[in-house]
Amino acid sequence: MHSGQPVKRERRNILAIMATVGIAGLGYGTSIPLLSILLERGGYSSTLIGLNTAVQAIAALVILPFVPRLLAWLGAARLLLICLLTIGTTLIAMRGFIDILVWFPLRFIFGAAIAVMFTTSEYWVNAIADEESRGRLVALYATVFSCGWTLGPLLLSVLGPERWTPVAVSAAILALAVIPLGLGGSAAPAPENSGSADLFGILREAAVPALATFVYGAVEIGVFSLLPVYALHHHLSAQQGALMLGALSAGTILLQLPIGWAADRMGRRQALIACALVGLAGALSMPYLTDRPLFLYGTLVIWGGCLPGLYLLGLTLIGEQFKGPRLAAANTTVMLLYSLGGLLAPPISGLAMDLWPRHGLALVLGLLCGIFALLALWEQWRQAKTA
C-alpha cells in the first residue's frame, strides 16, 4: 500500500503535467493558424508560407537528438518552462516583425521549442505512469492536449487575427504554465544523462511501437493539411471540408480515453493493430461516403479517434519497454519518427492527389495503415511462435 507522501507526489506530478499540456495545447492551437494568416495578409505566396511552416519540422529533426542531454541537465519541469517561455517570446517577435526573412530563423526557434516541449511532456507522463494505468494516463494526456488544441482556433475566431490581441493572449496563456510547473515541478522526473537518441537501436528493439508514431505523423499531417482539398475534389464545399476536420477533432477528443482504457484491459498490441485496421478501413471507405453525410461524419469521428490511437499506444508501449535513462532516448526517438512522417507525407500525398484527384489521398493513407497493420500482425505471430 502506498504511503501518503508518494501518493501526494504522484498527484502533484499528474496535475502539473496535465495542466501544463492543456495550457500548451490552447496556446499552440491559437498560434499555428494565426501565423499562416499573418503571412498571407502580409502578401506572401502560399509557397513561401508552406516553406516557412516546413522549417518547424526541420528544426525538430535538428534539436531532438539533444533532448536526452537537456533533460538530464535541466530536468523535465525546468526544460518545459524554458520551452513555453521561448514559444511565447518568439510569437511576440514574429508579430512585431512580419517579414519572411526574419521569420525563417524565428520559425526555426519556435519549431525547436515546440518539439522539445512535446518530447519532454511525453517523457514526464511515461516516467510517472505505472503499468496498470499507463494506457489511461497517456490517453488522458492526449485528450487534455486535444481539447486545448481544438479550443485554440475557436479562441482565434473570437479574438480576430488583425490585432495584437491573439498574440498577447497566446503568450499569456503559455506563461500561465509557470503556475502548475512551479507547484508540481519539484516532483518532476530528471533522468541520468543517457546520451542522444538512438534511432536505429530503438527501432531494432521496438520496431512496431516506434513505427506506429511514424505512421501517425504521416497520416495526421496528411489528413489535416489536405482533407479540405480532398473535399473540394469530391465537389464538397469549403464549409463541408471544415466540418470534416471538425468531425476528426471530435473523434480525437471523445475516443482517446476509451482506447486507453481498453488497451489496459485487452492488451496494448492488440489495440494497436485494431487502430491500424480501422485506419485502413476508414481511408478506403472515404471516397464512397462523400455523398452520404451521416455515414461520412460518423466514419470521420471513429477514424479521428483511432488514428491518434496509433501514437497513443506506440507511446504507451515505449514506456512499457524502456525504463530509466533509456526512456528519455526512446521518447525522443518517437518524436523524431513522428516529425519525419510529418515531413514526408504532405508532398507524397499531394503528388498522389495530383495523379488521382479523387482517390490519391485515401490510397496513400490506407497503404500506410495497411502496411503497418501487416507488420504488427507479423510481429505478434512471430512472438507467439517463439514463446
Image (spheres, rainbow, N blue to C red):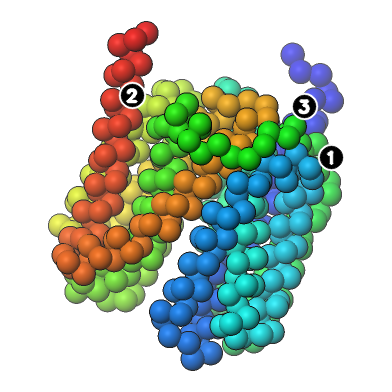
Q: State left or right for residue 57 relative to residue 97.
A: left
Q: Mark 1 belongs to which amino acid?
A: Ser
Is 151 or 211 nearer to us in this picture?
211
Residue 7's mark?
3
Q: Which amino acid type is shown beneath numbered disc 3?
A: Val
Q: Quadrant of residue 289?
A: bottom left
Q: Which mark is residue 309?
A: none
Contact (Cβ within 8 Å) of mark 2 with mark 1: no
Q: Residues within 10 Å of mark 2 (few under 14, many from 20)?
A: some
Tell me what residue is drawn at x 24 percent, y 47 percent: 367
Q: Which residue is mark 2?
A: 379
Sequence-first tag of 1 and 3: 3
Looking at the image, which is closer to me, 199 or 225? 199
N-terminal-most mark, 2 or 1: 1
Q: Is residue 163 left or right of residue 153?
A: right
Mark 2 to mark 3 CA distance (whole Å): 37 Å
- Residue 11 position, x and y percent, is 74, 35
Examine the image and state in which quarter residue 245 appears: bottom left
Mark 2 or mark 1, whichever is nearer to me:
2
N-terminal of the two: label 2 or label 3?
Answer: 3
Which dot, 2 or 3, sits closer to the camera?
A: 2
Disc 2 to disc 3: CB gap under 8 Å = no
Q: CA distance from mark 1 to mark 3?
A: 14 Å
For the residues bearing labels 1 and 3, Cβ distance under 8 angstroms: no
Element on which disc 3 rests: helix
Q: Which residue is mark 1?
A: 186
Q: Quadrant of the N terminus?
A: top right
Residue closest to the eye, 291 or 87: 87
Q: Is residue 342 visible?
A: yes
Q: Residue at x 63, y 81 (%)?
A: 102
Which circle, 1 or 3, is nearer the viewer? 1
